[in-house]
Amino acid sequence: MIGKRGKATLLLYMIFLAVLFLMCSTDLIIREPEKEIYQIAVIIEDSRDDNYGSFRKGMDQAALELNADVRFFTLYEKLDADQQMELIGREQQDGADALIVVPADEDRVVDALAGHQVTVPMVLLGSGLTGEGVTGTVVVDYGKMGELLGQKMAEHMDEHRTVLVFSDPSAQSGASRRFLEGARTVMEEEGILCRLVVRDGEQGFKPFTESLDAEGQVLILAESPEILAETAGILAELPDLSRRVSLYGRGSTLPVLNYLDRGLIRGLCVTDEFSIGYFSVGMAVEALETAGTRSSAVMDSWYIEKDDLRDPAYEKMLFPIE
Amino acid sequence: MGKDSFWKKTSIRYTIFIYFTVSALVALLLSGVALYVQMSRQLTAAVQEENQAVLGQVSRSVDSYLRTIMKLSDSLYYGVIKNADLSREAINSRITLLYDNNKDSIANIALLSKDGELLEAVPAARLKTGLDVREEEWFGNTLERTDNLHFTIPHVQYIFDNSENQYRWVITLTRAVEITQGTSTDQGILLIDIRYSSLQQILENITLGNQGYLYMISSSGQLICHPRMQLIETGQMTENVMAAAGYRDGSYREEFGGEMREVSVKSVGYTGWKLVSVTPEKGLPLGTLKMRLFVVFVVASFLLVLVLINAFISSRITNPIQELEKSVNAIEEGELDTEVYTGGSYEIQHLGRSIGDMAKRIKALMEDIVTEHESKRKSEFDTLQSQINPHFLYNTLDIIVWMIENEQKQEAVKVVTALARFFRISLSRGRSIIPVKDELEHVRNYLMIQQMRFKNKFTYVIRAGEDVMELASLKLMLQPLVENAIYHGMEFMDGDGEIMIRVYREGEELWFQISDNGLGMTQEQLDGLLSDRPHVSSRRGSGIGVKNVNERIRLYFGEHYGLSIQSEPDEGTVITIRLPAQQYTETMEKEGT
């Protein structure tokens, strides 16, 4: 009834049906994407996570959406590159699928990557490092942020045209260094004198601040959120002085925002920490799912003052909803 | 043109199969698409119904939650604030009691005068230095519409001095209240900060199938709660809130962000907030690749079954036609006795019987034609044989008379004897075929008579072996040819003529050769010899033409046989006859005589 050719066609058709059946009814050919849980280790450069509140919220949001298990690590000592490298190695051994690192020492990270000590995708935060082994970067251009703050400070400057720069070179991160460089470049172009004030050991900046008795306006630029909060705390205890001091800096930690709200800080440069956390985890997962795709995100910076805190746009950015 | 030739070359089975399969496929696809669309609709309706049910439940939960808060505000107002003289009695403890009972969902309770002074706050708090709450939007709205309860959208509570390094997202409920202080009664504002997290808890564990989610907006389209609220508020993502704000309660289908999605909307009681459920189309079960492949599999399986059924049906229809075709082919090849197939359906059976009857009729007609042809041939043959001119007989008899008158009795007896033999063989009981020996005897008698007529003007020789004597020959075959030789070759010849008749066998063929040394013939004469007109004067000859002989040979033995003539003027003529070498007796048996 059916010819040879017909039998061959029928056989092919039956095979096609069988394949179709296997495709639609089993996992042999088309496998439903399994919800793999990615182990991601986040290693920051600091010994405390005060500056990472919003970042962690963004990270948690991404972890929830992207099915990731994120472990967050601080160092025993701030900017301890040895310990950070040790943590990177340990987390890889413990089965981390990807790493998100805020480098304590960029050179050490570069060496580790060049020496193939890092075998899993690595996303770097706050650093513009690129090259082999770097899966992604979420960059905050601290230099540009410093320039923005420098311009605002120049606008607020009176005839004294001097800025006190509060710095701690012994614990200066790369972000703080670039931030100060940006601010000083702009201010020096404006003819403003930047006077460096270095942390005085255990006593910090308190002795120097208390010694400020000169009349007229005083502009202070703090290089890091910690120094900014510390200085604002000192000023809070010196109401007379605080009225003459205009304190500037960067960061969006709650103490810093509270000091801004209380008027102890005049102006702040902030960035969207929540999005940094969200993007970094997103990049790590993307790298795991697409076998090492490289991506990069550059975050914007904004200058805010007290009144901006209640602006709905800044409100959501600075006080992320959990 | 090409299409026509394709169908001409295509068998009826294949044609039926193609038509059945194509129409079945079209029907299958149409029903498949209709089924798929119907299933999609039903599934969408089911999803919408389910979403509406979930939304209804969540709406009731949110409504119940908000009513609890509103009841709290009523309790605070009517149970604590309204009847109290704030100048004389402290209400803080009573507010604290209510706060403690609801502190899971309440962040702050505060009583403010219309001048913006904080009269009571639980937990204890103070307004921020330099802050004028009268400038807050909610403050103005509350005093403007004193009968209403006012809900804000989520915000960070900002008015209280916060020594702790933390912030709280709240939704603020405010209402206008009457405050009694001594003898004066004035307006104030009761503020209740609802913990945003407690409201969030109601919504966060709601799942809407694969990829579905639920969010809540205010009547003006501001987000109150969304699984990705932070990302939307910081511009990392978008949500179609403005469209949702315009929707009334019900289900909608919308395109957003390049994808189709099912959206259901349900309003939340007093506040005018809207709960919105979103189910992306690709999250529906029918939208998955496997489900689409399954639909293809079902359609393809049905197609296979249809193809097999169609193949069976078409073979059932066409098998009898093919059998009938075989019968017709056999008939076409002349096998009229073939039994014609008469199976299959009624029409095919009828056709088969008709073709069978037709074959029988053709056979009968052909037999009639053969019989008629044979009869005609015999009739023609007889006619040809009867064409012996009576003048030959008259002249011969005249010679005999002349011989008797001249006392040539012996010669007269010879001629009479020869004439008698001549006629005896001419008659031969009406047979057309006679043995070679009789044909030779016949021509010998003729030559003897003619030799006497022409006073021995010619001589003749007949040579034939014994092996040819019993072979079959056509009667009166040689006599016209000899006659032709005499009248054409000898009559006007000066010298003595010679006629030679030679008969011999070569394999399966019998050859006769009649040669003379007469005048010979021109081409015109040769052509005339084979024409219908008698070549010898009817008064002198036998009246049987050479052409007649040739036709009779062909008529009897077939087209392969006959005579050929070679002649040259003044050289003589040779006529050769080719016949099959058949035994006379066998031929007669075949003839049935």
Image: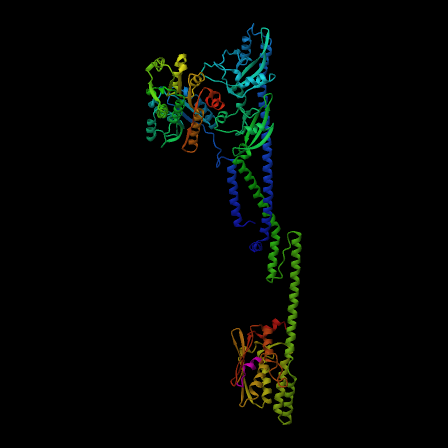
Between residues B335 and B147, which one lies in front from this camera angle? B147
Against A32, residue B544 (above or below) is below
Between residues A308 and A273, which one lies in front from this camera angle? A308
Residue shown at the point (33%, 28%) measured from the top left: A112
Quarter of the figure with the N terminus of chain B: bottom right
Q: Residue furthest front?
A: A159
Against A193, residue B85 (above or below) is above
* Residue B406 image position (x, y, % from top left): 63, 94
Whether residue B157 sits left or right of residue B426 in the image: it is left
Whether residue B328 sits left or right of residue A288 in the image: it is right
Against B565, residue B144 (above or below) is above
Among the 4 quarters of the image, the one containing residue A300: top left
* Residue B586 image position (x, y, % from top left): 59, 72
Quarter of the figure with the C terminus of chain B: bottom right
For the magenta stretch, what is the residue range?
B517-527
Between residues A238 and B69, which one lies in front from this camera angle? A238
* Magenta stretch holds residue B519: yes
* Residue B113 image position (x, y, % from top left): 55, 12
Residue B206 shows up from this direction: yes
Q: Residue furthest bottom?
A: B406
Residue shown at the point (57%, 31%) measured from the top left: B262
Among the 4 quarters of the image, the one containing residue B390: bottom right
* Magenta stretch holds residue A143: no
Residue B106 shows up from this direction: no
* Residue A164 image position (x, y, % from top left): 35, 19
